[in-house]
Structures are given as structure tokens and as C-alpha cells.
Image (tube, helix red, strand yellow):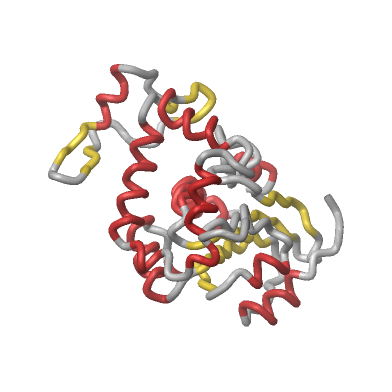
């Protein structure tokens, strides 16, 4: 994929940032409270050192406020230096990223419909994968961790080995992570979902070289579909790091 990509112009106009003379990985999230925003960043975190060591700029853009940025980074452990927040989806539109289902109804209903798979291909299968596991995906939680759920319920992560293969994504493991993310969002809904106009805004991933050529591009159209290969969401980076 070798076509011009006016990222420098977009950065200056929308983000007040100057393009640096090296490769850039640009991850564009929807609202910071979107399920994909949490999960994408959680998948990306283990690769940040490799990205930095490969002399690649990492820029993450999400719809939010300074308050939601601080909360999001504290929860996901993403260093704040990588995250830029914008107050609307004009940047997304400039990059032609899908806004998701936008029927003339309450935005929350549009989101619920997408959760049910309406105008969101692959979402229901991805939800199912979270419960049944995936032999083509890696496990999420380390051994001997404890997952803390409400009402002081603790689950030792080694319990997943009783119903799945160690080292691979085990049944209920991804579903547990998504449940934790959902609890975080619902408990701080007004912080994360400060503007319901963007509840269905989807994500985009771009890699641009030092000559401003687009090397990689993926634009999500569905909920829980932030990568071309959800079994290995960061697989696209292998050719660059």
C-alpha cells in the first residue's frame, strides 16, 4: 500500500502536532470508554517497548477529556505521553473512519444494536470467542494472578487452566477481561461517555513512513473488531518491529 497520506497536515490542523521524520504508528480510538478502546490498548501495551526500540513513533488518539484521559491511562497503564484526546470525531472523519450505526434514534440504542450484531459484522462471534476461548490466541492473565470482581470476589487466574490449555486463550478468560472493562466504564460512565454522539465511533490503525507514505491501514466497521485478526490483534506490527 503506497499512497500519499496527508498526516502532517491533519496533525497540524486537528492535533497541533508536527510529524516526526520516522515511521509513526497512529492508533485512533473512539470514545475512551468504548470496549474496543480498552481492549486495543491492553493488547498494545506489551509491544510499546519494541515499538520504541524500533524507532517508531506511537500516537494514540481518543475522544475524551483530560479527566477521562487520566482515568483511562491509570486503568490501562498506558503512559499519558502517548495519548492525545480530542473532543469530537472530526479527526476520525478526516481519516474516513466509520462512525458506526447512526440511525436517527437515541445513540445508546444504536450502540445496543451494534452489540447485537446490527451493522456490526463479526461482533457476536467475537463475543462468543471470549467465552469459548481461542487456540490461535495467547492467554491474557499470568499464572497466580487474582482477578478482583465486585463484592470482594477474587478469582485465581490459574483456574482457567481447568477448562483450557495453558498458554492459549482459555474459555471465559477474555470474557473476564471484558467484564472488568465494562465495570470500569459503567462505574464512571459520565467521565468516559461524556458525549453520547460518539458512542458508536469505530477505530482506525495507520502506519506511515518518514516520507509520509501509508504502509498499513485498517479501519474498523464493527464493535470488537479493532483488528483485521482479532486472534492476534497486533500481528500487523510484525513487519515493522
When the figure is inspected, residue 19 is found, relative to residue 223, above or below; the finding is below
Q: Residue furthest left?
A: 152
30 sits left or right of 205 in the view: left
Question: Which residue is most to the front?
Answer: 105
Which residue: 44% across, 52% down? 38
Residue shown at 52%/39% (left/top)? 116
Question: How far across and down, in percent of the image, does residue 132 sit?
Answer: 43, 23
At which x and y percent is residue 186?
33, 55
Indicate the quadrant where residue 227 lies: top right
Question: Considering only vertical position in the picture, is 127 above or below 16?
Answer: above
Viewer-side residue, 105 vs 86: 105
Residue 8 spot, x, y in % from top left: 74, 74
Q: Which residue reaches farthest right?
A: 3
Q: Quadrant of residue 174?
A: top left
Instruction: Report the side of 137 relative to 142 (left or right).
Output: right
Q: Is residue 155 left or right of residue 57?
A: left
Q: Is residue 46 visible to us here?
A: no
Amino acid at each position: 500500500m503506497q499512497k500519499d497520506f496527508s498526516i502532517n497536515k491533519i496533525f497540524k490542523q486537528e492535533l497541533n502536532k508536527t510529524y516526526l521524520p520516522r515511521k509513526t504508528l497512529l492508533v485512533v480510538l473512539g470514545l475512551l470508554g468504548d470496549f474496543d478502546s480498552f481492549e486495543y490498548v491492553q493488547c498494545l501495551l506489551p509491544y510499546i517497548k519494541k515499538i520504541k526500540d524500533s524507532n517508531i513513533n506511537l500516537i494514540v488518539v481518543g475522544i475524551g477529556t483530560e479527566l477521562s484521559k487520566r482515568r483511562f491511562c491509570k486503568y490501562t497503564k498506558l503512559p499519558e505521553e502517548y495519548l492525545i484526546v480530542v473532543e469530537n470525531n472530526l479527526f476520525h472523519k478526516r481519516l474516513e473512519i466509520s462512525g458506526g450505526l447512526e440511525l436517527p434514534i437515541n445513540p445508546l440504542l444504536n450502540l445496543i444494536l451494534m452489540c447485537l450484531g446490527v451493522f456490526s459484522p463479526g461482533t457476536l462471534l467475537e463475543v462468543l470467542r471470549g467465552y469459548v476461548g481461542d487456540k490461535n490466541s495467547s492467554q491474557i492473565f499470568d499464572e497466580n494472578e487474582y482477578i478482583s470482581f465486585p463484592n470482594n470476589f477474587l478469582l485465581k487466574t490459574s483456574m482457567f487452566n481447568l477448562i483450557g490449555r495453558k498458554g492459549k486463550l482459555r474459555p471465559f478468560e477474555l470474557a473476564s477481561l471484558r467484564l472488568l472493562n465494562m465495570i470500569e466504564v459503567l462505574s464512571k460512565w459520565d467521565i468516559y461517555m461524556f458525549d453520547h454522539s460518539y458512542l458508536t465511533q469505530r477505530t482506525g490503525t495507520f502506519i506511515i513512513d518518514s516520507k509520509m507514505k501509508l504502509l498499513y491501514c485498517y479501519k474498523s466497521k464493527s464493535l470488537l473488531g479493532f483488528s483485521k485478526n482479532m486472534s492476534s490483534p497486533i500481528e500487523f506490527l510484525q513487519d515493522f518491529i
